[in-house]
Image (cartoon, rainbow, N blue to C red):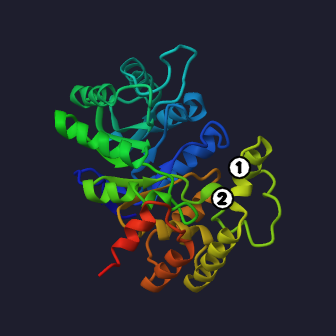
Amino acid sequence: MEQRSLGRTGLKVSELCMGTMTFGNETDEQTAHQMLDAFVDAGGTFVDTANGYSAGASEEILGRWLKNRQRDDLVIATKVFHRVGPGHNDRGGGRKHIMTAVESSLRRLGTDYIDLYQTHVFDENTPLEETLSTLDRLVTSGKVRFVGASTYAGWQLQKSIDLARQHGWEPYVCLQPLYNLLDRDAEWELVPVCLTEGLGLIAWSPLRMGLLTGKYHRGMTEPISGTRVERLNAIGDPAWTRYATEHTWRVLDVVREIAEEAGRSVAQVSLRWLSQRPGVTAPIIGARTMEHYEDNVGAVGWSLTDDQMRRLNDVSVRSLPYPHDVLAWAQTLP
């Protein structure tokens, strides 16, 4: 597996990141450890979790696996924001919560340091200066090596970068956004910020709840039983309505054509497209089973052709919203 620099840092990470959101929930500990073993055997070094995944069980499962591994050979990322207790300060980006949460994550992971500590969601109720200065203290203390962000708007990410630069604090070195063939909104503002400022880009949900794995096809009127889409649909989340559209079926038609040409699976083509997009360091694979993992890891060691990338880009692109549409049009003026 290829090793890539995370943004402009000297930190090397594998071209696929092992996501652990399913650990302790959809994936039991034995299967989780089997997948992690296989990932490392394939050259993987980059593992991502969060304090909020399975109420901390994901970190604990990863921590027990780490005991039998050479810690310095791996890059372990986790996140902070979501509620982990009943107290008023048990969530968010405030100093009290971050300082408590990092100690809890270190304990669950069974490690002395976290390679990449990410703010999971932008906190509108806490001054950015408080969040960023606290993260800077964690790096200075040695408990954290690098800091990053996940669900941020473009202006929130840029303001964070500018404030860190102004105060001499440790800057965000990467962003973890939603990004895949069906969700390319990150390209409007977030990807340009990352490219301009030198942030690495590690994309979550690269197969969008299984929609880009080949299980779904034109003509389907309801989600597949037992899938994440069905579970969300059952609790009123409009995931199925949002994605069961002509746009999705057109994208999947082209992905299938290219998968057949390349002798690859639909999931592998979807992951490979993302891996070859500008600025992307690593897609985060979130396999639930060994079968899913083995399919996902087949996205490395080969490349889509320029023509295949063009076809995938063309079919998946969406109309730009204002002001991006006007800005793009203005660039064409003589």
Q: Is residue 67 visible?
A: no
Residue 242 image-quadrant placement? bottom right
Q: Nearer the viewer, residue 192 or 84?
A: 192
Q: Nearer the viewer, residue 232 or 286?
A: 232
The amino acid on which the numbered mark 2 sits, given as a three-letter code, is: Gly
Residue 325: give x, y in percent of width and height.
45, 67
Residue 275: give x, y in percent of width and height.
43, 66
Q: Is residue 10 visible?
A: yes
- Classed neighbour count for the residue bearing mark 2: other residues with Cα under 10 Å, few (<14), some (14–19), many (≥20): some
Residue situated furthest front in the rendering: 334
Q: For marks 2 and 1, give the CA distance.
A: 8 Å
Q: Which circle marks residue 292 in the picture? A: none
Q: Which circle marks residue 228 in the picture? A: 1
Q: Are the two marked residues, 2 and 1, in contact with CB atoms closer than 8 angstroms?
A: yes
Q: Nearer the viewer, residue 226 or 327?
A: 327
Q: Nearer the viewer, residue 129 or 204?
A: 129
Residue occupied by mark 2? 210
How many marks are shown on the rendered structure? 2
Secondary structure of the residue carrying numbered label 2: helix
Q: Earlier in the sequence, mark 2 or mark 1?
A: 2
140 to 300, vertically: above or below:
above
Write the residue at 47% across / 30% down.
81
Residue situated furthest top in the rendering: 87
| Quadrant where the image shows the C terminus | bottom left
Write the residue at 61% across / 43% down.
22
Secondary structure of the residue carrying numbered label 1: helix
Write the residue at 59% across / 65% down.
295
Residue 206 image-quadrant placement? bottom right
